[in-house]
Image (spheres, helix red, strand yellow):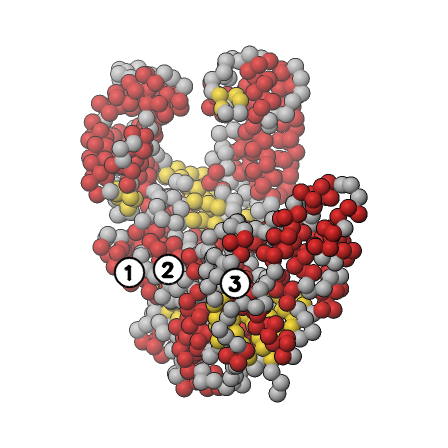
Amino acid sequence: MSNKLLLVDGNSLLFRSFHGIALLTNSKGMYTNAIFGFTRVLNKLIEKQQPTHILVAFDAGKTTFRHSTYEAYKGGRSKTPSELKEQFVPMRNLLDAYKIKWYELPNYEADDIIGTLSSEADRQGIETIILTGDRDLTQLVSEHVTVFYTTNKKGQDFEEYTIPFMQEKYELTPKQIIDMKGLMGDKSDNIPGVPKIGEKTAIKLLKEYESVENLYEHIDELKQSKMKDNLIEYKEDALMSKALATIETNAPIDVSIKDAVWDKDFDRSALVEMYKTLEFKSLLKDETFSTSPLTAAAEDKGYEDSYNTNVNSLNFDKLKEDSPLYIYIEHIEDRYIHKSPLAIALSDGEQVVITKFEHIRQHDELCSLLKDESIEKYVYDAKKVYVMFEQHDVTVKNITMDAMLGGFLLDPSVKVEGMSQLLHQLQLVTIPSEDEFYGKGKSRTVPDQDVLNQYISQKINALMECIPTVVDKLNEQQQLELLKELELPLSKVLASMEVRGIHVDVNTLHSMQSEIQHRIDDIKDEIYSLAGEEFNINSVKELGVILFEKLELPVIKKTKTGYSTAADVLTKLEDKHDIVKHILNYRILSKLQSTYVEGLQNEIYEDGKIHTRFNQTLAQTGRLSSLDPNLQNIPIRLEEGRLIRKAFKPFNDDYVLVALDYSQIELRVLAHITQDEHLIETFNNGGDIHTETARKVFNLADDTEVDSNLRRQAKAVNFGIVYGISDYGLSENLNIPRKQAKTFIDNYLKVYPNIQKYMDQVILDAKRNGYVETLLNRRRYIPEINSRNFHQRSFAERTAMNTPIQGTAADIIKMAMVKYDAQDFEDRYSAYLLLQIHDELIFEVHRDDVEAFYQDVKQLMENAYPLDVPLLVDGSYGESWYDTK
């Protein structure tokens, strides 16, 4: 067999692999993606080319002999990422395990080592392959030397640069690549070249003059042009650039081709150990080594893969006895409704299986275990697990632990949508985040299955590792019951709501879209008439000119770019000119049209329904949020906004929509928490809290009628207190002087003295503990409470005051939802829970069941949690969501 030399540009291939493969770590947190990519490409080329000699060349450092010529050489390059740096040494160790020679030489680059060895091999007539991601090395191509240039980011595909290929591609010889670099430069290496000369121009010049030196000997022959001027002015740069781009073929290396001999039948036991350390399980199964001693060596070592795709490998007997079944679903799209995940990972605590739903459905014993209520299931994101399993016709029951929900309860300020964030929060060995692994935006890609499986395997192993820590910490904080009795059961309820969705009549939206557009057009005409000209109402700049220059309205606020036309500014100008009211209405209707009337049409699925997602881990108060679309945010102050709810209807005419809403729940929680006797008395006597507050705050006699304006002001103070409102905030809400707002608040706190005591005490507790809690032990950390910054501290104090109230109110409606599910209302009645909108629940109920259902659920909600004042629920039903009010 004739000799064949493989020379590998180590740094180039590592960089390619690092940037082409998403970040990957082993279970000890060591980054491995560059090494993995490097190894996979090396294996592929070894299998295909069967070299007898291999050498990998590395750069020895950043400084080389070229820097003495040009100090800025490679000066524009960014700093090597630490995640890549830490892979340099293990990569060399892996090459040692391969028995592959690697070499580096101070003051020289890997290119120079390769150049010297390839030249020696060329002189000896040895077939040579150079593997690189750097086209500079194509200058080394010769009759015996071929450059394999990696063409994709992962380095797995190659262009083979030979003399004929280069003639066809560039119409140049390999040596002329140096001249081309001299003329056009190289931004990646910070080689200057000649300004305004690119690749096409350089090739054209070299086809005529062959070299940089010959070009300058005939420079006078060129027509007068800017290019000629640049060539003359930057002659020294061109010659220097060529010198910088020239690979040294006579470097003082102390290795030879003989040192690169590689025996493919080497003892692979050390390599197996390295694969095991790096956790490159898939490479052991790679076809590259399917017939080699590596597989046998792995088996001799008793090497076990951390995952496989065979469901039968799970220990079903162990699961039946006492072990939980761990479940992790990898789904990288936020909108998971009606979409399949990338994979499902299952584990019995020892063996990891990565599979698909179609394989689960075919396995009767596993399906039985999944719905077996005696076997506990531990998961990450229970709601998503329930949704995915239900949508794929597989039943899963008895999810008793959710690491994501547990992590959120431990500290709701930490976003735990991804496993890596949770591990970081718990200070455990971390793994790459999804953005790191898959990339962001347009660069987001799903890697090869073996890489993907390894990442998912890391995730489910991390799940198994973090759950004991989560449980211990929840126990320490007395929050395990909150997870087990409230959040986990709620996740199942929410999953059913997401899958069910709510029917939306698109014809109603179409009709509304046309009507609102007519309104918008009429308002625009009115605005143009009042302005005396047409202009772009949506342009802040043009609107500012109309209002503050042409119409000479008083300037309230300026920005860096001109006049402020923000809503709060325009609200203060409403009584100054009729145009302002029309502009505000125009904005509201335009937002209504684009975001809701038109926007909701884009959210309707093929089943004619909207399937919003409910997020349990977003609001630090514990409130649920609605996403894609946000149905909690449909504006209802304007009648046009309320009319949007007409489009939300039952799925057929035999049903109606029923809405049940907690009345003033936060004020009732406030009364219970503060134990204020006046508040408690008013609620227990069935009085109107806003009317009673108005009487007390404004010192009105018992027989004095409280008009609507005074009641409105009292209502603003009542709810303002709940939200920790300041005198400035109240003055803005009521459009009254700040001093008057302060008087209202001061009078309120005198009338309800226990509220002031509560506010003082909760701030004191927050400063001492660093957190506040709801009645159900939901915790919120407020580190800014001890800030020296007045504004930060003030905001933190308001947060401390309102969180226990808002959070407890949120917990109560969640508890009502869980109790509703536990009492099997949907079996007793033809009824379905569709939406939760703040303090309101929306149901779809058969007409024959409405009256009985309404009374039963009203009673359930009013008894969801014991307070010292009664919880009151109002509601109604109708043909649409709009008709329930």
Query: What amino acid does circle 1 point to?
Result: Thr
The answer to whether residue 698 is visible is yes
Q: Is residue 481 left or right of residue 834?
A: left
Residue 871 place in picture, x, y as percent: 31, 39
Q: Which image quadrant: the N terminus?
A: bottom right
Give percent across and percent down for residue 382.
40, 58
Can you tell which of label 2 and label 3 is closer to the viewer? 3
Q: Is residue 795 left or right of residue 885?
A: left
State which tag comes first along the sequence, 2 or 3: 3
Left/right placement of residue 767 relative to residue 351 reads: left
Element type at marker 3? loop
Residue drawn at x 61%, y 64% is 137
Q: Nearer the viewer, residue 260 or 289?
A: 260
Cα distance in 3D space between marks 3 and 1: 48 Å
Which residue matches tag 3?
A: 109
Marks 2 and 3, how far apart at CA:
35 Å
In the rendered structure, the answer to whether residue 136 lies left or right of residue 432 reads right
Instruction: Name the element at disc 1.
Output: helix
The numbered mark at residue 430 is: 2
Q: Which residue is mark 1?
A: 469
Is residue 669 visible in the rendered structure shown here? no
Q: Residue at x 57, y 14 (%)?
A: 549
Hey, what amino acid is under mark 2?
A: Thr
Separation of marks 1 and 2 at Cα, in angstroms: 14 Å
Q: Secondary structure at mark 2?
A: loop
Residue 314 vertical position relative to residue 532 in the rendered view, above or below? below
Tell me the kind of residue under disc 3: Glu
- The 10 Å Cα crowd at callout 2, few under 14, some 14 to 19, many 20 or more, is many
